[in-house]
Amino acid sequence: MRRNHIRIFISIFFTVCVFTLAATSLSAQEPAGATGDPQGSPRDLGLTDDQKAQLKAIKQNAKEQLQALKNDESLSPEDRRARAQEIRRNTREQIASILTTEQRQILQDRREQRRERGFGRGPGKHGNRSGRKLEPNP
């Protein structure tokens, strides 16, 4: 039971962190061409003002839904986790729907790079509980 609570918390925490990082990245990035690169900075998706507004609304909606879910004590931990996964999936689909094919490809490439680097993974403060042998990064 406690393990489920921890998993839910970690899922919600990770989602909020991703949205916070995305919002920070969007607000802090330079306009395309400002760095001398015609495509803008490497982290730039080249979002239009309309896309930025839509993205902000999507993220705000997801944040509100996740907060409401967190406060809903009528759901079991399993139902809460399933609903959180559904909210995240819907959010990803909504974001993908406002992006161009090129922007979706850039986003997909970044996700794959994070997966390859093991983003967010590691032994943590309690050591390696998975039983897997940890190998040093090259």
Image (cartoon, helix red, strand yellow):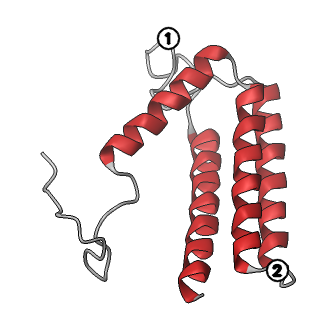
Left or right, 61 with respect to 7, comes to right
Q: Nearer the viewer, residue 89 or 68?
A: 89
Q: Residue at x 25, y 74 (%)?
A: 128
Look at 74% across and 23% down and name the residue there: 48
Which mark identifies residue 118?
none
> Residue 44 placed where, x, y %?
54, 28
Residue 134, how many percent across, how many down?
18, 62
Q: Is residue 71 left or right of residue 101?
A: right
Q: Nearer the viewer, residue 130 or 44?
A: 130
Q: Position of residue 121 (x, y in %)?
A: 36, 60
Check the picture and name the quadrant holding the N terminus: bottom right
Residue 20 image-quadrant placement: bottom right
Secondary element under disc 1, as helix, strand or loop, is loop
Q: Which residue is mark 2?
A: 71
Q: Nearer the viewer, mark 2 or mark 1?
A: 2
Q: Given the current orientation, which residue lies at the most extreme bottom position?
A: 2
Q: Amino acid at mark 1?
A: Pro
Tell me the residue at 38%/36% (across/down): 113
Pointer 2: residues within 10 angstroms few (<14), some, or many (20+)?
Answer: few
Q: Position of residue 78 (x, y in %)?
A: 70, 73
**Secondary structure found at label 2:** helix
- The tag earlier along the polypeptide, 2 or 1, is 1
Q: Residue at x 63, y 40 (%)?
A: 26
Up-down: is 84 above or below 40?
A: below
Q: Type of residue at label 2? A: Asn
Cα distance in 3D space between marks 2 and 1: 46 Å
Write down the residue under mark 1: 38
